[in-house]
Amino acid sequence: MNMLLVAEYRQGKVLGNFHELLAFAAQLQGQPSLFVVGDVNAPPAFPGRVYIADVTTYKEYDPSSHKKLLLEAVRREQAEMVVFAHSSYGWDLAPRLAMALGAAQISEVTAVIDGDCVVPACNSKLRRRVKSLSAITVVTLQSGAFSAQAAQTGTPAVIPLEIDEAGPYTFKGYEIATAGGVDLGKAAVIVSAGRGIGKPENVALVAELAKTLKGEYGASRPVVDAQWVEHHRQVGTTGQTVAPKLYMACGISGAIQHLAGMKKSEFVVAVNTDKDAPIGEIADVMVIADLKQFLPVLTEKLRMV
Amino acid sequence: MKILVCMKHVPDMESKFKISTDGRWYDDGDLAWRINEYDEYAVEQAVRLKEQLGDSDITVLSIGPERVKEAMKKALAMGCDRGVHVVDDRPSDRDAMAIATIIAAFARGRNFDCIFTGMQSQDRGSGQVGLLVGEMLGLPAVSTIVDFSCIGEHNYTIKRELEGGVRAVVEVRGPALFTCQLGLNTPRYPTLPNIMKAKKKELLTVPVAELAGGGNLQDTVRLFFPEKKGGGMLLEGEVPQLADKLIAILKEKTTVLA
Ligand SMILES: Cc1cc2nc3c(=O)[nH]c(=O)nc-3n(C[C@H](O)[C@H](O)[C@H](O)COP(=O)(O)OP(=O)(O)OC[C@H]3O[C@@H](n4cnc5c(N)ncnc54)[C@H](O)[C@@H]3O)c2cc1C
């Protein structure tokens, strides 16, 4: 099966995540080629065909021209599968391409069983096995689900792509969040508050416990979005990535975007009222309790240790 | 300005899910339902746009069985002007393309200037429907927005959220579609007077057969619970004993209490 893998280019660099797409292609025993809107003079190392369109012409974000360039590459490659990362670039472009190809798009693939894709459902509580019914299939892969292949070597066969296009999008550039006051990366212990804390006053329960453990407190996204905790304490794909000795997730369900930021922690304790919360999949210890009752008692007892 | 908001009714994710008898979706009895979280931001943004521009009209559309009317009433109480309930008893049998086809069929010819959807649903999570509707209607569509400003009638400056704290600034001209990410705004709580007023607002009913077309491009083979990773310990019981047990484990397995 010919597979076209879509690499991403951001702030002047090809992102490394296409190595995960290569691992997926290898698992399906497909023949991969690459596509990137990037620097025509600096193609990524890869022992095969690389379709490149010039990023100075088509910009780092312009879904309308990128879609048309991709269609051209799919046609030339006679690809039966187009593979993206499930990222802000991938999930934005994939449906547009799928629509143009009349193809099924299967989003956020985590595994393959007998040629069918498996995707998460209900905030990762469930999994769904999906079969494509179309001639061409577009997939996006969950970040980290397929372990990246080793860095590639070899000189690619570069195929330059061009189209006529003046699309409706004007990309003005990036805004980078300013680094906040706390570097969670340095803390040996992180106690994080999730939506299960219920109200802003309860941030104190988490902060107290963190202090008692000589650590820092963090938070999941809804707690930050509600402005109960500052953004620089957010853990996850759109926040910080941490790997402390102890991570305590209090009232956090364990959505993939949160796990991505803390799953390398040495020891994970979850405090949750829901036994089926997906955080249980990675927690070393899952305490089934109401955090409003449990945290004060735990803090008190720890003070006496 | 004519505004359309698309909204899905989903179970509370803390619910205890059971697999349906056909094995392909969850059983929808015994669940608490609510507006898909992402769509609440979409509703709020639509209402804010109307407040900014005045002289606008917001239609909120939802596909599903009778119960979705509850969600639509909340959206009306938040400030939408009219509800369109597309009656479909089994929307979960349709894939993203089929759902988008229904929405696009409704929107076509009605000349909406601005369409808002959530970036994804909490249950299916495909993240496709909004963008597909945009493609079907030939409108520019910007996904995962965390900042929205409308300058003049039809010029938008949008911030898209990328990974690791980076945002892309994008400008488009309407008519356009936007898919809303968590944190885009702070959705309001409907006030009692607005809940009362919402009762008098128009709630149209459209049978899904009038809008649907084409079949699915993909098929759910089955829905299942993931296997629990071995090794994790589950502690249940009374709070003081739980705390003692956890402290003992931390002493044994980690160095943080040393
Ligand atoms: C593109 C994208 C990027 C994202 N980036 C991030 C990110 O960087 N970080 C992040 O965290 N999320 C991120 N999210 C959001 C993510 O998908 C989840 O919505 C979020 O992580 C959920 O946060 P939560 O677990 O605190 O809340 P919920 O999922 O609502 O879970 C609350 C939990 O608290 C439990 N609970 C309730 N009451 C109690 C109680 N009294 N005692 C104990 N437990 C209780 C419940 O059982 C439940 O498990 C992102 C989403 C998207 C789409």
Image (tube, coloured by chain):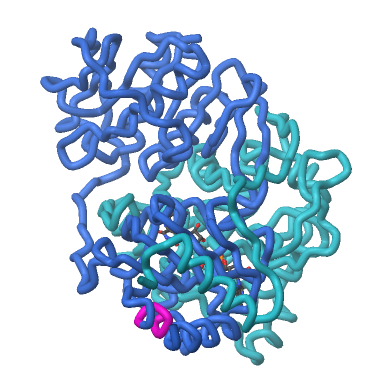
Chain colours: A blue, B cyan
Q: Seen in the image, is A284 located left or right of residue B88?
A: left
Image height check: is A174 above or below A30? below
Image height check: is A288 above or below B8? below
Residue B212 in which image quadrant:
top right
Residue B190 in which image quadrant:
bottom right
Query: Where residue B10 appears, x then y in whole percent?
Result: 69, 59
| Residue lying at the far bottom of the rendered structure | B193
Query: Where residue B87 appears, x then y in whole percent?
Result: 79, 54
Question: Residue, x 60% and y 44% (percent of image)?
Answer: A120
Residue B174 magenta: no
Question: Residue, x 67% and y 22% (percent of image)?
Answer: A133
Image height check: is A295 above or below B98? below
Nearer the observer, A23 or A2: A23
Query: Where residue A105 appears, x then y in whole percent?
Result: 55, 31
Nearer the observer, B216 or A259: A259
Q: Seen in the image, is B201 located left or right of residue B181?
A: right
> Can the viewer see residue B39?
no
Residue A208 magenta: yes
Nearer the observer, A234 or A158: A234
Image height check: is A17 above or below A73? below
- Could you tell me what secondary structure mostly forms the magenta stretch? helix
Query: The C terminus of chain A appears in which quarter of the rendering?
Result: bottom left
Magenta highlight range:
A207-211
Q: Seen in the image, is A171 located left or right of residue A101?
A: left
Query: Where residue A271 appears, x then y in whole percent?
Result: 57, 70
| Residue lying at the far right of the rendered structure | B21
- Figure label count: 0
